[in-house]
Structure formats: structure tokens, C-alpha cells
Image: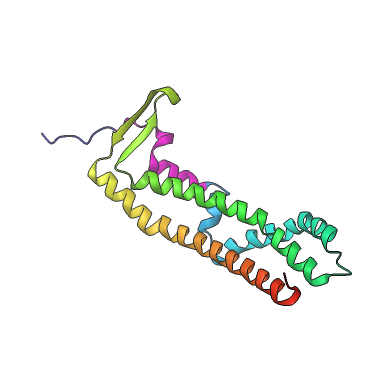
Amino acid sequence: MKPSAPVCPVPTEQQPINEFQDLTESWFFRWATLSRVAYLKPILLLWAVSWAFSAPIATVSFPANKYPGQFVLCAAGGACVIPLLALVQLLLGWLYVRDRLMKDTIFYEESGWYDGQTWTKPEEMLQRDRLIVTYQIKPILQRLLLTFAAFGGLLVLGASTWILSFGL
């Protein structure tokens, strides 16, 4: 008689593979898995909508009719806040699931915060989870980090333009 595989005591909704599946099906977190154009469209949309908040604030310091360059740079930089917050939320969600999939033990709660337990994954489950991280989650994290780098580059470019054009 062959020994049976250990039964997973972790509640279904707390199993890392199911948390990963939930993220891939979530309308918000799935956004990071879309094609390049479909991924960039919400970022640009959030940036454009953010102008509604940043432009009035920039206008107080730099009226557009008197200081158009400073107004545009200040409003564009301020409009980056909301897309960056959305990207931070995406990054944190994917990092959480990546960490849960990579660990060889799973912390879970049976009925509440006061009765947490740990369970050690069998080797085949650990290998499966690590393959998911390598081939599905790492490209998502690389895309998000590249997006942060692009935002950082644009902010540095804006700051450099400000300094070179208008001085400190």
C-alpha cells in the first residue's frame, strides 16, 4: 500500500495557490498581467484624471498664464501620485502572494487571529509553487519595477528640466 499524500489543513481561501488564482481573476490585480497596451492604458488614464486634482493646486503656486512651464511640470509631477499609489498596491499584492508561494511553510488561521498554525508544504507542492513564481509572478514583478523606474526617470527628467530652465 502506497502512503497517501498529506491532507492540506490550510483553509482553501488561505492556500497560496488559491490566493494566486484570486489575484489573477481580480479586476484590479489582473491589470498587471495584461498586454503592454492594456497595462499602460489605466496608468495613463489615472495620470490624466489626476490632473483634475494636481492642476488646481499647481495653479495656486504657478498661474498657467504667467508661468506655463512651471505649471505644466508641477501639475504633471503631482498627477503622478495617484498612478503611483495604484502601482504600489499592485506591487504589494503580487509580492505577498509570491512570498506565500516561495515559503516552504504556510502560516494560516483556523478560525481567527488568535489560533494561527503553520503547515509544511510537501515537496511536490513546493516545486509547483516555485515554478508559478518563476514563470508567472516574476515577469509581473519585473514589469511593475520597470514601470516604477520609468516614473522615477520621468520625475528626474522633470526635476532636471525645472533646474535647467528655471533654476532652483
Most common secondary structure along the magenta stretch: helix
Q: Name the image colouring.
A: rainbow
Q: Which residues are magenta?
A: 8-25
* Front residue of this view, candidates 22 and 64: 64
The residue drawn where x is 69% and y is 62% is: 77
Q: Quadrant of the C terminus?
A: bottom right
Residue 29 percent across, percent down from the top left: 54, 50
Q: Is residue 53 left or right of residue 161?
A: right
* Marker count (numbered): 0
Please name whichever residue, 86 or 127, is drawn nearer the observer in this view of the structure: 86
14 above or below 66? above
Q: Please report the residue visible at 23 percent of the width from the left and 34 percent of the height from the top.
A: 6
Residue at image point 30% right, 50% down:
128
- Residue 9 on the magenta span: yes
Q: Hey, which residue is sitting farthest bottom in the picture?
A: 164
Q: Is residue 102 magenta?
A: no
Rendered position, 18 above or below 150: above
Single out the residue that lies furthest toward the right: 65
Residue 119: x percent and y percent?
Answer: 30, 33
Residue 161 at x, y percent in the picture: 69, 74
Q: Residue at x 28, y 46 (%)?
A: 126
Q: Is residue 4 visible?
A: yes
- Residue 46 position, x and y percent, is 68, 57
Residue 37 seen in the figure: no
Question: Where 119 sits versus 42, above or below?
Answer: above
Image quadrant where residue 49 sits: bottom right
The quarter in which the N terminus is drawn is top left
Q: Is residue 150 left or right of residue 12?
A: right
Which residue is outermost to the front? 168
